[in-house]
């Protein structure tokens, strides 16, 4: 932040701007000049703090140009939510000043901003030298506090008439959740989704809503019941005579499971397994579906089913017992899942535990882990978002979109388990599907996000269900006239070799690796191969690599998670370094060729800390070069 006094050529410009503010409008030019001369002009970059909650409130400020996010801590919690956006010509901080209480909110600039600050001395002089100032201040505060909601955290009112949401925005939340909680998305912008709340905002409701949209920042706003009703009806929610919402009936779509088949199941683990004939496999289990539909409506992220216990689910990050549910018997969980499991899932389960996907059409998809323990059978189900988020909603930069426009080559999305790789890849495939006329083949284990063919033709194949392995599926894909191939896991040398061959023969290949940085991704691919082949692999990779997106998820201050990205954009210089075995020098190009879209992980972590979204300690835990990140903040780092 930089400061300068309001004087000289700057004075008339500031006076003219202040006239447009509700607080200073109507004051004489002489009074405005007195006010301006007492103020200080401050220049902020995006992400800087103007006022901090808990600090003394000795003055107030006017947003001359730019905007700032108002961040408030919810009562009796550590959860921080954005409740308002201060825009140009709005004042802020006056109420705390008049009440002589510490700041109740933190204000952080959303973009580069010019702010006029009135400190304690300036305010005192205004009251003494500008008689009309007190009346103007009272009128401005009265207008702002009109019709408050005393039982709720004050939220800004969202006017749907100015910007009615599109269908793609409203569908970001499941219809069952919308009906149950009376919340609905109203606007989506750059990784942020504004969600309209009819009822008073509670921590539990806010966290439940946020859990439904991982990877996005949820901004709560207030909407009235009639606006909610109109939007909800368009989402498939009906209302009874008393105005109570419920989800309308939907036509069942085919599930991703195969058609009903007769099968043989196993009933016990180990060498004493008993083989027993079973009836036809079912696509869905009504008893299980009822529980999962309620899980979606309640906003739970995970459902835990354990023998000798009542079911529990995770809401707002905490496990809650479903008190009205019955205690599960030793084989209850198996009885729930056995009718819907494939033969391969059963066989894999009796050798170990098993993961598979389960879908309730038009409701949600779930990733299932089935296991056995000392008390019997158990399962954990995690809800997979049924809505594919866009680049804008995820906040992915333009460089990532450009990677999707290449006609051929290889794009790698990397990061640890649970870092959001699948979500980012789904957005990339969805972009191509909507904007290019291509044939897309995805090879996954299991299928998570379902892509309906748009401009492109999309074929999705699940390893174990539709093909034996990634290797065999990739070989087959080359005979199926693809333009785009997504390889869900590049686990072994054969799969990587085939992926490189596919990328080098006129196809655009997307793949994932469990690596932390762009450089380690390149080294991992090359090191998979015997030393005698590495020179050839470097040459092939140098020719086809178009980009690497490495991401990690950081815990946000107040709850939730946010992605930090490292991006490497392919270029002739990058190709030369890969070919020559000098991958360690790639970081120099990433730092100097930022206009091409290159980003270093530590740079992104630094921005998140400065913006107040992530604590320094959390950023340090995610950094690969911890010493370099510490230096950015003038600190030292010592290895433990």
Image: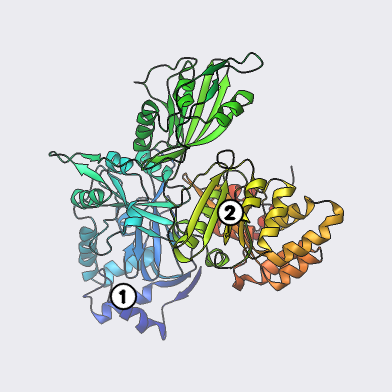
Residue 16 position, x and y percent, is 31, 81
- Seen from the viewer's position, the closer of residues 364 and 414 is 364
Say the numbered circle drawn on residue 508: none
Residue 486 has which mark? 2
Q: Residue furthest left?
A: 241
Q: Nearer the viewer, residue 90 or 187?
A: 187
Q: Residues within 10 Å of mark 2 (few under 14, many from 20)?
A: many
Colour setting: rainbow
Crowd around label 1: few <14 · some 14–19 · many ≥20 (10 Å):
many
Task: Tell me what residue is drawn at x 42 percent, y 40 percent.
Answer: 255
- As drawn, the residue found furthest toward the right would be 532
Looking at the rendered structure, the number of numbered marks drawn on it comes to: 2
- Disc 1 on helix, strand or loop? helix
Viewer-closest of 36 and 308: 308
Q: Secondary structure at mark 2?
A: strand
Q: Answer above or below: position of 449 versus 373.
A: below
> At which x and y percent is residue 214?
46, 47
Residue 450 visible in the picture = yes
Instruction: Tell me: 327 left or right of 599.
Output: left
Please give the label number shown on residue 18: 1
- In the rendered image, residue 256, in percent from the top left (x then y), is placed at 46, 41
Which of the image's four quarters has the C terminus?
A: top right
Q: Is residue 318 above or below residue 398?
A: above
Give the mark toward the camera: 1 or 2: 2
Above or below: residue 37 compared with residue 307: below
Sooner in the amino-acid sequence: mark 1 or mark 2: 1
Q: Is residue 413 visible?
A: no
Q: CA distance from mark 1 to mark 2?
A: 55 Å
- Residue 576, x across and y down, in percent: 76, 70
Question: Is 283 situated left or right of 461 in this image?
Answer: left
């Amino acid at each position: 932040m930089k400061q300068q006094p309001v004087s000289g050529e700057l004075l008339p410009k500031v006076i003219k701007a202040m006239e447009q503010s509700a607080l200073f409008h109507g004051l004489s030019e002489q009074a405005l000049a007195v006010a301006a001369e007492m103020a200080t002009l401050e220049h902020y970059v995006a992400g800087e703090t103007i006022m901090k909650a808990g600090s003394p409130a000795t003055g107030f400020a006017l947003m001359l140009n730019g905007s700032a996010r108002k961040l408030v801590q919810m009562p009796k919690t550590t959860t921080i939510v954005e409740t308002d956006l201060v825009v140009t010509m709005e004042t802020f901080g006056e109420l705390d000043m008049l009440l002589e209480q510490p700041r109740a909110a933190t204000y952080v600039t959303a973009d580069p901003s010019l702010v006029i600050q009135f400190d304690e001395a300036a305010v005192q002089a205004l009251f003494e030298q500008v008689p009309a100032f007190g009346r103007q201040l009272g009128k401005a505060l009265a207008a702002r506090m009109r019709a408050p909601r005393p039982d709720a955290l004050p939220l800004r009112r969202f006017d749907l008439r100015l910007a009615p949401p599109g269908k793609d925005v409203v569908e970001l939340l499941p219809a069952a959740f919308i009906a149950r909680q009376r919340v609905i998305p109203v606007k989506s912008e750059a990784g942020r989704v504004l969600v309209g709340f009819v009822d008073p905002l509670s921590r539990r409701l806010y966290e439940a809503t946020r859990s439904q949209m991982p990877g996005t920042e949820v901004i709560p706003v207030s909407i009235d019941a009639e606006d909610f009703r109109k939007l909800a009806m368009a989402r498939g929610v009906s209302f009874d005579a008393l105005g109570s919402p419920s989800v309308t009936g939907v036509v069942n779509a085919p599930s991703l499971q195969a058609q009903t088949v007769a099968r043989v199941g196993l009933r016990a683990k180990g060498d004493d397994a008993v083989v027993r004939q079973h009836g036809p496999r079912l696509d869905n289990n009504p008893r299980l579906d009822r529980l999962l539909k309620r899980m979606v409506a309640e906003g739970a992220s995970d459902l835990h089913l354990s023998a000798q216990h009542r079911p529990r689910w995770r809401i707002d990050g905490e496990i809650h017992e479903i008190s009205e549910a019955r205690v599960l018997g030793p084989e209850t969980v198996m009885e729930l899942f056995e009718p819907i499991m494939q033969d391969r899932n059963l066989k894999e389960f009796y050798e170990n535990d098993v993961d598979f996907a389960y879908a309730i059409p038009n409701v949600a998809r779930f990733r299932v882990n089935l296991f056995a323990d000392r008390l019997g059978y158990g399962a954990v189900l995690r809800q997979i978002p049924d809505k594919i988020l866009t680049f804008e909603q995820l906040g992915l930069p333009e460089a990532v979109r450009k990677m999707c426009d290449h006609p051929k080559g290889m794009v790698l999305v990397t990061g640890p388990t649970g870092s959001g790789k699948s979500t980012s890849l789904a957005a990339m495939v969805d972009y191509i599907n909507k904007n290019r006329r291509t044939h897309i083949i995805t090879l996954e284990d299991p299928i998570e996000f379902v892509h309906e063919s748009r401009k492109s033709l999309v074929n999705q194949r699940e390893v174990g269900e539709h093909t034996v392995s990634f290797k065999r599926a990739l070989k087959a894909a080359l005979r199926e006239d693809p333009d785009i191939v997504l390889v869900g896991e590049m686990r072994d040398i054969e799969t990587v070799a085939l992926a490189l061959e596919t990328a080098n023969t006129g196809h655009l290949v997307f793949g994932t690796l469990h690596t932390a940085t762009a450089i380690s991704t390149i080294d991992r691919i090359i090191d998979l191969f015997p030393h005698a082949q590495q020179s050839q692999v470097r040459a092939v990779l140098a020719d086809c690599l178009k980009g690497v997106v490495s991401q990690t998820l950081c815990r946000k201050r107040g709850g939730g998670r946010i992605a930090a990205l490292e991006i490497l954009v392919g270029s002739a210089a990058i190709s030369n370094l890969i070919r020559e075995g000098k991958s360690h020098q790639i970081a120099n190009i990433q730092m100097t060729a930022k206009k091409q879209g290159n980003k270093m992980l530590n740079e992104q972590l630094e921005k998140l800390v400065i913006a107040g979204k992530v604590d320094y300690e959390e950023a340090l835990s995610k950094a690969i070069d911890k010493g370099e990140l510490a230096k950015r903040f003038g600190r030292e780092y010592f290895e433990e």
